[in-house]
Image (cartoon, rainbow, N blue to C red):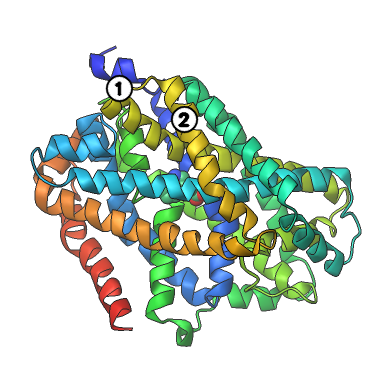
Amino acid sequence: MSSPDGIKQRGYWGSGLGFVLAVVGSAIGLGNIWRFPTEAGQSGGGAFVLVYIIATFLIGVPVMMAELAVGRRTQRNPVGAYRSLAPGSGWGLAGGFAVFTGLIILSYYSVVAGWTLKYTWIAFSGSLHGATPEAISATFNNFIQDPGPVLGCHLLFMLITIRIVMGGIQHGIERAAKILMPVLFVLLLLLVVRSLTLPGAAEGLSFYLKPDFGMLDVKVILKAVSHAFFSLSLGMGAIITFGSYLSPKQNLVSSAVWVSCADFLIAFLAGLAIFPAIFSVPGLEPDAGPGLIFVVLPNIFNAIPLGHLFGAAFFILLAIAALTSAISMLEVVVAFTIDELGWNRRRSAIAVGSVIFLLGIPSALGNGAVPLFAGTLDFVNEYFGGMGLVLGALLVSLFVGWKWGTGNAVEELERGRGTFRLGQVWGFLIRFVCPLAILTILFQLLRG
Ligand code: TRP
């Protein structure tokens, strides 16, 4: 192997394909299938979707290339990466901010992932088979108000995540991503077909795809842009960390493009499955909030022969998609403690994972179980999953564009592929378009 010793000790990807699939695994998760329809539904549908698409390709793709370049050049966790490219400056703090954001995001992400575990069981048991839409909604509301099962599922999900991260990069992450993502894709296609053929589907399609520009205010734009970062796993150093395990042969530019296309495709299909069904079933509303897919999907399964088995398969695959994303978030913090604090991988995964479990308890119990924690999940989802990532992405683009320099970054991007002909365009996007777009939004937001 031509890889430097440093990579060998920290772990490295078994193959280029394994890496791309692992980044796809990180990108595709609850963000695509849970968060995207939830946010789009709350923010008026088509207008949100349009901004999300533009943000993904105009800002997300360039930022992903920037994170990959920083990661591979430094072969370090986010804190070490910033520090080693700008020694003696305050930039290490930007890495610290990224690691902290990741910790908080995973704490509530795991709670929702726990819901998918529970729903795998609910679907499989057949208890919602043939149930009325009201009964389906009631099942969800009863579940999230019951502390025991909600905490149990959150715990179970964190334990599995910890176990895989303990096993290290290659064995844990690559294997899970390789096999299961294609199966999820096929199931999602089936759901789309069923949903689009439900009576009343057209109304949902038009909500989803026809932008109502009256809905576009700065809040919606911020939500759509930050969701693009969330969905692509950007802004908290996950892609820096994954890039740090890369061999010099990998083509970073095409990796970023492929990953983003795959991620967008899955989110888009999820919307095509969810929105027609919402408008076809009486009593369902697009702005239902975090429970949206858990009350919509069972109604679709009920319109499919053997739907409860489909449902169980779908939820377990969604849980696995969430797992490959959660792994990438935990890996960021674990890589930080290994590189900077000298911990070993096992101890770090257990300690950090336990802290994250504890931090997630208010999000788990804030949905009706414990009044004191009411609204925690929505709050952290909005401020850390939203604003935190936007700030993280702003820092990455400022750092790469103005501190480390796009010349150095392009040099890194050209390793393993040859001349990057659009390098200038990329540099312009990273130096000007990304930071200015983000700063404009933040400025408008402050003005109220
Ligand atoms: N992108 C993942 C999803 O869509 C979630 C995720 C994983 C993430 N790693 C991240 C989000 C890093 C932000 C930052 O479900």
Question: Which quadrant is home to the C terminus?
Answer: bottom left
Could you tell me which residue is drawn at 58 percent across and 49 percent down? 361
Could you tell me which residue is drawn at 24 percent across and 14 percent down? 5
Where residue 253 appears, as percent x and y from the top left, is: 29, 42
Where residue 139 appears, as percent x and y from the top left, is: 81, 59
Sequence-first tag of 2 and 1: 1
For the residue marked with disc 2, what is the amino acid?
Ala
The numbered mark at residue 351 is 2
Q: Please, what secondary structure does the residue beneath circle 2 have?
A: helix
Q: Is mark 2 within 8 Å of ligand 1?
A: no
**Residue 314 visible in the current orientation:** no
Going by the image, does 310 lie left or right of 251?
right
Where residue 173 appears, as percent x and y from the top left, is: 50, 28
Return the residue at label 1.
342
The numbered mark at residue 389 is none
Going by the image, does 410 lie left or right of 114?
left
Residue closest to the far top: 1
Going by the image, does 368 lie left or right of 25?
right
Viewer-side residue, 129 vs 165: 165
Q: Please, what secondary structure does the residue beneath circle 1 have?
A: loop
Residue closest to the far right: 130
Q: Dot 1 surroundings within 10 Å: few (below 14), some, or many (20 or more)?
A: few
Going by the image, does 435 lie left or right of 9?
left
